[in-house]
């Protein structure tokens, strides 16, 4: 049986890291695509030259022509520009929307059966636009945000409690921006919900509130430190977990920016929700019960995403 083909649209910081992880995990063969000439070819060759050392069998190639992604099983999209210090994800909308148009057309023409994972920001609006531009089925076009946001939340919690990251689960709902909703009630250490850990004296409500805020600002914290771009190791690892769940039909429960139609009172909108990812793509949207304040936070986040979608429609009339 031939190996799965994984197309990485964008061969920048995240694209290169994705290619390396696909190789190390032997998930399939990689085609790196970028408009910059030499970059995808150079990164593909560099990683391929590491394969004898690490002992993995993946064919890695680079290209500047969409024909190279023909028949891809998975496309992971990072094409576009990242933010610089002082910028919000939303500041990238105008430039990256144009990029989504060309990427959507390239995928539709060459890899219409692929499972597409978008990482380009502002995420919720860009994945919405990518689905529209590509015309691919909604359950096959998904955005990576929740796995990353909850990984940041889990890491900070594991640090606070002095426990293994493996035993911390966390839930983050809503848009991938300042209004994201980390849900403490559904986040646990060894199965114990965070509010109970406060009662048990493991931490204080103030410390927990600070961790929630640090999670919301997690992307900006990295941008502030790097100064020349945004996070790439954790975003790449997060998208790989989603791709792996699809390719191996793992049916993992992962929070992603998915098209929600009906659940959470939403009507055909992309926003971060818990999902089940398997061989059919997004196989289920998990609708959890929210209390009044959680619902209010989610509503605020949904409004922020709606504003970005409207801005996209204002820029590109074909989306209206
Ligand atoms: N088609 C294909 N590739 C493109 C296009 C395009 N139209 N426009 C830009 N690119 C490429 C750039 O040449 C660059 O190699 O996209 C790549 C982006 O890489 P980086 O600038 O290193 O950005 P990265 O850190 O990988 O982040 C990419 O993900 O997390 C988000 O906010 C982030 O939107 C940004 C995206």
Image (cartoon, rainbow, N blue to C red):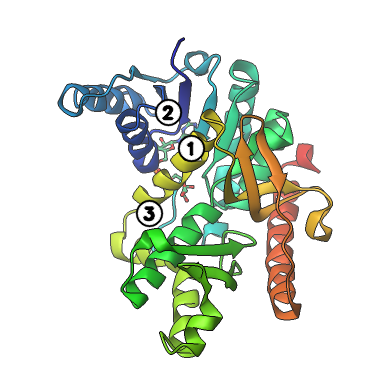
Precedes in sequence: disc 3 or disc 2: 2
Q: Quadrant of residue 46?
A: top left
Tell me, yes or no, if residue 86 can be seen here.
no
Q: Is residue 307 left or right of residue 162?
A: right
Q: Which residue corresponds to mark 2?
A: 34
Looking at mark 3, is its residue's CB closer than 8 Å to ligand 1?
yes
User: Which residue is drawn at the image coordinates 65% and 62% (left, top)?
Assistant: 174
Question: Mark 2–mark 1 contact, CB under 8 Å?
Answer: yes
Tell me, yes or no, if residue 35 can be seen here.
yes
- Mark in the foreground, 3 or 1: 3
Q: Label 2 to label 1, Cα distance in Å?
A: 7 Å
Against 255, residue 99 (above or below) is: above
- Mark in the foreground, 3 or 2: 3
Residue 231, which numbered label?
Answer: 3
Q: Quadrant of residue 156?
A: bottom left
Q: Kindly state the secondary structure of the residue where label 1 is placed.
A: loop
User: Which residue is drawn at the image coordinates 68% and 29% (left, top)?
Assistant: 134
Q: Position of residue 209 (x, y in %)?
A: 50, 83
Callout 1: 10 Å neighbours few (<14), some, many (20+)? many
Q: Quadrant of residue 249?
A: top right
Q: Label 3 to label 2, Cα distance in Å?
A: 19 Å
Q: Kindly state the secondary structure of the residue where label 3 is placed.
A: loop
Callout 3: 10 Å neighbours few (<14), some, many (20+)? some
User: Which residue is drawn at the image coordinates 69% and 59% (left, top)?
Assistant: 305
Q: Which residue corresponds to mark 1?
A: 79
Q: Kindly state the secondary structure of the residue where label 2 is placed.
A: loop
Report the quarter where the C terminus lies.
top right
Precedes in sequence: disc 3 or disc 1: 1
């Amino acid at each position: 049986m031939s190996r799965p083909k994984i197309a990485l649209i964008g061969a920048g910081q995240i694209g290169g890291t994705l290619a390396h992880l696909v190789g190390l995990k032997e998930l399939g063969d990689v085609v790196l695509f970028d408009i910059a000439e030499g970059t995808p070819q150079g990164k593909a060759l560099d990683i391929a030259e590491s394969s004898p050392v690490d002992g993995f069998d993946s064919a890695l190639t680079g290209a500047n022509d969409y024909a190279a992604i023909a028949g891809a099983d998975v496309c992971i999209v990072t094409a576009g520009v990242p933010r610089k210090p002082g910028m919000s994800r939303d500041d990238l909308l105008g430039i990256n929307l144009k990029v989504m148009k060309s990427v959507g057309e390239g995928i539709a023409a060459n890899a219409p059966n692929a499972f597409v994972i978008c990482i380009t920001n502002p995420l919720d609006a860009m994945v919405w636009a990518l689905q529209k531009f590509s015309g691919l089925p909604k359950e096959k076009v998904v955005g990576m945000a929740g796995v990353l946001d909850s990984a940041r939340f889990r890491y900070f919690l594991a640090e606070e409690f002095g426990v293994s990251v493996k035993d911390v689960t966390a839930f983050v709902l809503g848009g991938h921006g300042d209004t994201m909703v980390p849900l403490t009630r559904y986040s646990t250490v060894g199965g114990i919900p965070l509010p109970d850990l406060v009662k048990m004296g493991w931490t204080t409500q103030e410390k927990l509130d600070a961790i929630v805020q640090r999670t919301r600002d997690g992307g900006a914290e990295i941008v502030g430190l790097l100064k020349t771009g945004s996070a790439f190791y954790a975003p790449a690892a997060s998208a790989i977990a989603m791709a792996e769940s699809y390719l191996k039909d793992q049916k993992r429960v992962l929070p992603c920016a998915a098209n929600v139609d009906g659940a959470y009172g939403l009507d055909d909108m992309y926003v971060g929700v818990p999902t089940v990812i398997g061989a059919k793509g997004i196989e289920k949207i998990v609708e959890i019960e929210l209390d009044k304040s959680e619902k209010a936070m989610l509503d605020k986040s949904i409004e922020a995403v709606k504003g970005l979608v409207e801005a996209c429609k204002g820029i590109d009339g074909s989306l209206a």
